[in-house]
Image: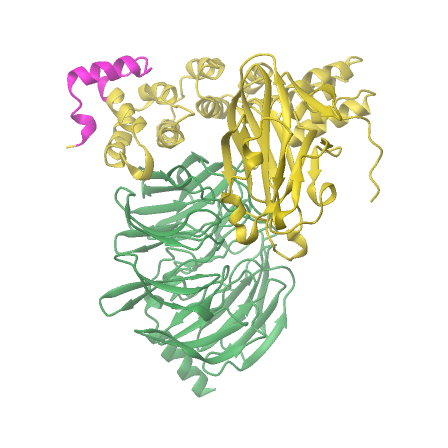
Amino acid sequence: MIRSLLVFTLTLALTPALFAADWPQFRGPNATGVSADKNLPSVWSKDKGHKWKATLPARGVSSPVVVGDRVYVTCASGIRGDRLHVLCFDAETGKQLWHRQLQATGSTACHPKSGMAANTPVADETGVYALFGTGDMAAFDKDGTLRWYRSLVTDYPTVTNAVGMAASPVLVAGKLIVPMDNAGESFLAAVDTKYGKNVWKTERPREINWTTPLVRQVGSTTELLFAGPKGLTAYDSATGSDRWTFKAGGGSIPIGVIDGDAIYLPVGGVTKFKIDDKGISEKSEWAAKDMTTGYPSPVVYGGRVFTVGSQGLAVCADAKTGKVIYKERLKGIYSASPVAGDEKVYFMNELSVCTVLSAKADEYEPLATNDLGEASLATPAIAHGRVYVRTDKALYAIGK
Amino acid sequence: MHLWKCVPPIALGAILALTPARGADDDTTRALTALKAVTKEGKGNEDAGPAWKTLVSKGVPALLPALEAFDDDNPTAANWLRTAVDAIAETEKAAGRKLPADKLEAFVKDTKRSATARRAAYELLVAQDAEAKGRLLPGLLNDKSADLRRDAIANQLDILEKLARPTIKADLEKLFAFTRDKDQVELVAKKIEENGGKVSVTEQFGFVTFAALVGPFDNTAGKGFAVAYPPESAINATGTFKGKGDVELKWGDPSTANKSGAFDLNKLLDKHKDAVTYAQAVVTAGAETSCDIRVTCATAVQIFLNGKKLFQREEYHHGTPFDGHVGKGTLRKGENVIVLKVCQNNQTENWAQAWQFQMRVCDATGGPLPLQQKVTTAGKTETHKLGWLPEMKEEKK
């Protein structure tokens, strides 16, 4: 037990993302799904435990993102799903600060579960960058001023994915990284955050893919680790040139987690590999086949790996050995990825029933099961000591 | 210094003449010009950003000029303008001020304006005057804005059902003619049937219901998509071709679509894989007519009109969105040959076996055009209204 606590504490101390209080992108700091915040809520319901609740104009499966005193959310409305919305709320009060709308310029075809507000926006202290499944992309200052707008389907007319696009952009050193794997002209691009123009654009295989790039620092180079059906490729974020490819790291929906010198990839369940400056080792450290993923990505927290499969099989495994500590079938269908913080792990199903587990428990012992009573496919965000949940109808700031 | 601030006076004069911005001051006009000048890959964004701020800073006086500047043929610029309209309206609302309702209402009624802009104006108006819906919607049943039309039809259907007049069948039939969205077309058709009437959904959609087929040609490794096999340039359904595996092919007699306007190639030809087939239809127009040729298909397609390629998309088994593929063209007076290239790949999953298409010829709103289909079988030619189907027996399941 003492050893577990030591590992837990050491892991918390070594993970740089954990010092960030914001939740600026899909799955938060460094796409880990982990927050350093304390005093996070365990118990809530449809009517209790919220700091505030704000009505949303339409559905979306994108996550809310939180930077400073702002929460940003995207939605898509209309029978054709072609009205795109970007909204900004005061993180403390839930007051809607601004709401901007765009008319979709690309196809709105998608799987019925998804929608055009599927890509999670990314924010920094200056504002928010929203990419939609239609290929519409816009940057807004934090006061709602439109900084720039691009129609990627106008720019690159063969871009198409009738299942719907959902890969989320990330920010790296003044560049917005845009993942655009699809059945037509596919690319990974960097656009400048000031004017939205291409800095570089690297060709990718013409295959549909919904993964979000991971970012890591290797010496003076910032690498983008982008998984696709044919493998995981590292790109130099300054130039877009590819540095190496790990063919066994292929994927198309859930994304991996980098934790120190290890990377946990959602392949064959979850498989742990060593990662160094040259790339990912061919030989795995361990593979946990029980850790099925489906849509949700794994989360690595407190020396443990947590997963939930689309059908609700939640698994907790030791991050060092891959040994399964416990597994439990949760009720419902899962699209949202689990998130963690304050020694808790949050698993939210598609009906917004959230099972909260202790990250340290050696058995399945839910701290609470909380029901908001609304459909939601979006991964929650954690910031300011709160859990932000967007359902099909509303945005909740849960906690104090 | 930004470009839009440096426009020389002569050029500005020309721009002013071209920009339909009534009552706009010079700053507003220059800002609108910069916003309308954005093009591909962010070209013009440097100037559009400051222009956006200028436009929004002008407040309500810039609202109508911004709406008037929308151009549905330049959706990139329209989105710059759309967000500026939002920002202006939001500032006014926060200040407790009303927007100019009379001007917005007049703008909504002005059908020469952009459909997107008119919808935006309608929503702004309705947000501050809920009664505007009742005033405006009855006049928007045949609107070019898909969303305004949709709301108008829903509103009218609600009225008709509440009134339940003896003339409801005829009232519904009139309403049916305005329907465009698939769900509304089918809903109103069903209500007409419930009231003892009958309308043709396939004619309302303008489905091509007779097409000659020829195939399979080779599409191994998807390469056939880029190969222009001879039927692509066919002007009639004659001739022989060398197909996949050197099999000699010729156009078959026109096949008939099923009751929902679909041609199931797996049934009409065979369950070919790595294959290309062509469907040819002859459509007759009484005058030169702009048209959409809209195709619903789960696999890669190319659309040709009178030998000219209008559209192509190389995507397989990612879904079958209605009207997912749209080619825009112009029908000439008289006979027009429409050729659809439909490809199939070699995926083995159960959900990837579909090989079928629906094709329709309609106006830009998705509405029916006065077109005929020419069907020639064994030397005998028949002409039918586009979308016409002979009475069919129920298909065995």
- Residue B247, can we see it? yes
Location of the C terminus of chain A (image quadrant): bottom left
Taking the image as shown, residue A60 lies to the left or right of residue A178, namely right
**Which color has been applied to chain A in this rendered view?**
green
Instruction: State how the image is colored.
Output: by chain
Extreme-bottom residue of the structure: A2
> Chain in yellow?
B
Q: Which residue is nearer to you in this view: A70 or A208?
A: A208
Q: Is residue B54 above or below residue B274?
A: above
> In percent of the image, x 48 and y 15: which residue is there?
B111
The percent position of residue B25, horizontal first and vertical second, equals 25, 17
Taking the image as shown, residue A120 lies to the left or right of residue B374, namely left
The percent position of residue A346, horizontal first and vertical second, equals 52, 64
Q: Which residue is nearer to you in this view: A201 or B104?
A: A201
> Which quadrant would residue B347 be assigned to in this image?
bottom right
Q: Which residue is nearer to you in this view: B234 or A80?
A: B234
Q: Is residue A281 above or below residue A307?
A: below
Part of the protein shown in magenta = B2-27
